[in-house]
Image: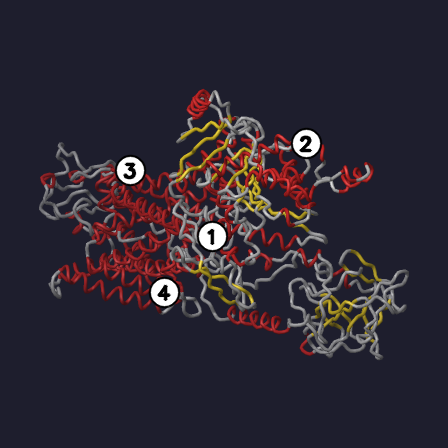
Amino acid sequence: MFAPWCCPATSRPRVGGDNYSVDMSSPSGQKPALKTAGSGQSRFQVTEVTELGPVTSGERTSGGTDGTTGTTGSKGSAGGEESKGRFSVVKFLDSGGIGTDGSDVAQNGDTVRSTGSHRSSASGHTNISDTHSNTYYMRTFGHNTIDAVPNIDFYRQTEAPLGDKLIRPTLSELHDELDKEPLDEDGFPIGEESTLAEEAAAKEGTKEQAKGGTIKFGWVKGVLIRCMLNIWGVMLFIRMSWIVGQAGIGLTCVIILMATVVTTITGLSTSAIATNGFVRGGGAYYLISRSLGPEFGGSIGLIFAFANAVAVAMYVVGFAETVVEMLNDVDALMTDELNDVRIVGTLTVILLLGISVAGMEWEAKAQIVLLVILLAAIFNYFIGTVITMESKEPKGFFGYKAAIMMENMGPDFRDGETFFSMFAIFFPAATGILAGANISGDLTDPQSAIPKGTLLAILITGITYVAVTVSTGSCILRDATGDHNDTSSVSDLNCTDAACTLGYDFSICKEGGCKFGLMNDFQVMSLVSGFGPLITAGIFSATLSSALASLVSAPKVFQALCKDNIYPGLHVFAKGYGKNNEPLRGYVLTFCIGLAFILIAELNVIAPIISNFFLASYALINFSVFHASLANSPGWRPSFKYFNKWVSLAGAVLCCAVMFVVNWWAALMTNIIVLALYVYVSYKKPDVNWGSSTQALIYNHALTHCLLLTGVEDHVKNFRPQCLVMTGYPNARPALLHLVNAFTKNVGLMVCGHVRTVSRRPNFKEMSLDHARYQRWLLKNRIKAFYTPVFAEDLRHGAQYLLQATGLGRLKPNTLVMGFKNNWSDGEMKDVEMYINIIHDAFDLQHGVVIIRLQEGLDISHIQDPDELLSSHEKKDVGMKDVVVSVNMVGKDSEDGNSFPPSLITSAQNSPLILRETKRSAKPLSLTDQRLLEASQQFKKKQCKGTVDVWWLFDDGGLALLIPYLLTEKKKWKDCKIRLFIGGKINRIDHDRRAMAALLSKFRIDFSAIYVLGDINTKPKKHNVLSFEEMIEPYKLKEDDMEQDAAERLKAEEPWRISDNELELYRAKTNRQIRLNELLKEHSNSAKLIVMSMPLARKGTVSSALYMCWLETLSKDLPPILLVRGNHQSVLTFYS
């Protein structure tokens, strides 16, 4: 079969048109021939479509390097643009009637290669000329095949302005047989025209959006400027000199270095995360959530957005206080200082909101203006340090003097201040490093901009802080009176301080009361500067720029958080407006929060918490890098290489330590809030999957522990039932599923096996989709199990596959659980033979076997399609009608929170059951089906007081005792007590009871009573024996009524038949099963559950029909019963 020509891989749409067609065929012994479009005689047709009109004679088709085919060589192509051609398989035709003209065409895989060139003759026929000059197909590798060449557009997650989301050919498109669906006259599969039109419209819409003029920033304007403005806060102008006075030049440099180390490590970690893939909007929240998952991301995102919102109030109040001080100096207060702060703060935050709402472009321009003012203020200060004036000397400023520098080198802590208190005061000045990352969605290239801008900002601001520290410590005395008359003689031999050597005596300041110098004047930098008012302008610029950055950051982070729907009630704030998707609602919310705190005006209490919120974000960013590196996921490939996982871990620890240094009670409160939000998000389990490092680390741990388990031999103390449960579709047999889940949950492995018998080729694609869907169903219903379907020729082969291949290392089933075949007598005996052989296969593979029987049955799939039991959001049916049936069912499961599937909606007991039928007339359920549905849900509810009767007649290793023990340990079964029934001699009942009680005591298994049955071997009642004879009558071989050869031949053809010899040989065992059923009805008819030792049948000796009759006789007309037989290896021990 020839491979079809196709459209270029990067332009997937299949198109039709009025262009010429190329017919190809491949008859045996003949060369492919090219026919006209209307011949209809080739194996399949290929339509080439040119967008600039039909191909004329003399035009030549050639391949372009951009993944399209075009026409060249004709001046008829207006504008010089190549016409783009596409190929599409448009018909699959009969192979008869093939032409013989044409040239050689080599077929290789799905690539069509020719040494000739296409020409369209005047007669309308298309020929191939053997020129060897055109290597069209060889020059367009990957574009003349269905297989696509590597393309970045295939790896995009969604449609984005920076590029189209394209879909590579699926494996099915490349691997499956050619689709033979009918085509219309234009070459489209019938019914696809509208879909293709919608795709084209969607792409046009995307292109228009891309041309919409979205404002994006580079690394300088978007990151560097923002970070510098945030780090250069008011601390630089009004607190830095005081810290130098307290801690001295040396320790202040150490403080700056420590803060810079923390921020640098965090910057390196931020750079690593930002360069590990495309970064969208959301800043710190996006980086943390995509690395550590929604639990950490959701908790830190909320408090980070809140911290930025409150930071707006902090910075605005700082600005307002400075303005009010100036008004107070000129006696121009409006009311009083507190209310003036509120008035000025309110007006300021309204102005900032207007700038923000106007758009990011206006906000960026405002930031540049503020940066210019701030830089002018800083340069103004440094210029002032070299301009000495005699009038400033009494106030402590003398210019650069070695004596002053040496005196200020060491610390002079006063008023109870310490090194750590100085560090706590300074560190908030360094917390602006995420200002650029917070607007990551507005950056042209976040992967490049965030590392360069953030790290360079840390370097520049760090150098600036050190320079200010050294300069203030070298120019200004710690104390000065400001009085020109406080002079001293330089010849005085008693000079011990720098002021004395410079001709001043400020010794009176030791008694307190001085208003000048590093220790006393917060505005000393205004004194030093060349032009004092410019320092005030710098203070204004620093506060307003930080407030503006926070006012922009908070809504952006909050919008990203709301878009992910981590907190469902906040989704209203996810909506964006305008070409930049501005979060206007977020701006209003941030404005309201900031305004509220401005009006409260009690920021001294909230400020430490805000600083700790920022530090918590830094700690988690550092921990994200460590965690991702530790998980060693192949997806962790940051292009930024200058990081180390241990350095990042140290950075996370340092951030946590700094939190407690800054304010211990605020640190505790921050941790409590983060933990509470983490627990909330973990409980809600948002339906997101971001490929977090948490998932990668879980995989690593699981793989490591599986390998460790494999190297350790099994021990009886660690035995746990690991069940392969033959459920079919998991929701088709609810009772089976819930009962096994009850004793395996949090204890052992549970695998839901499903054998799908096929007579033709299996549909693996459908099975793969079902596997994912039903696994989600199990997770949603909180059933801790794995769904494993297999295709097989019959049930037995499928069970063999599952028994042999299911599991991983030690995590593999050791117990087969099946439902009892209730309808065995109504079906074909070959199915019974297969059913019994599965039990034999399980024993051959050293598995235990558990058979569960409910008198009503287990399978509810005939009542409605199991797919309809899936959640409505996974599969929605169209044209459905509701059938209301009164069914007695229970409500929500009290232990594990299970709820009924959407198709089984109940509000209370005896409430109507709503069933959904598709396009069928509503039919009420029969009474039998109603009882079946009731029984199928009985193990979901909490069991009321009763007993679990264990008939431990044969020692199978203890599995028949372990399962009821595990069951009664669960919350739903804890009100049920274990009663034990054993066989014994009539004259040793007390002895056997005491012996069993001693054994159970050593096993540490509680029981309510022990019954020793001495009459098991008593003959059963005659009418029960007759009933058994009637049951087996259709399955007897009756060899006495036929020739020996005929009997042997019939036995070979139907091995399940019961011979007279076999029946007589196992007469005693048959009578025992009949008698046990009588005893079960006598003693356990009111039990909640019966666990019974399952009788064994010797393989090859006992026929399937006889064994099935034993099981039927033993378990009929009883409460729910488990027939259990272990593999005769101990699963219980009394040794420690």
Q: Residues within 10 Å of mark 4 (few under 14, many from 20)?
A: many
How much space separates mark 4 and mark 2, taking CA atoms? 98 Å
How much space separates mark 3 and mark 1, taking CA atoms? 80 Å
Q: Are marks 3 and 4 in contact (CB under 8 Å)?
A: no
Mark 2 and mark 3 lie on one chain; the one further toward the N terminus is: 3
Residue assigned mark 1 = 934
How much space separates mark 4 and mark 1, taking CA atoms? 65 Å
Q: Are marks 3 and 1 in contact (CB under 8 Å)?
A: no
Residue assigned mark 4 = 363
How much space separates mark 3 and mark 4, taking CA atoms? 39 Å
Residue assigned mark 3 = 250
x and y, in percent, of residue 5 in the image: 75, 64
Kind of element beneath mark 1: helix
Q: Amino acid at mark 4?
A: Glu
Quadrant in the picture for the C terminus:
top left
Q: Amino acid at mark 1?
A: Glu
Residue assigned mark 2 = 1064
Towards the viewer: 91 or 662: 91
Residue displayed at 33% across by 64% down: 587
Of circles 4 and 1, which is in front? 1
Of circles 3 and 1, which is in front? 1
Of circles 3 and 4, which is in front? 4
Q: Amino acid at mark 2?
A: Glu
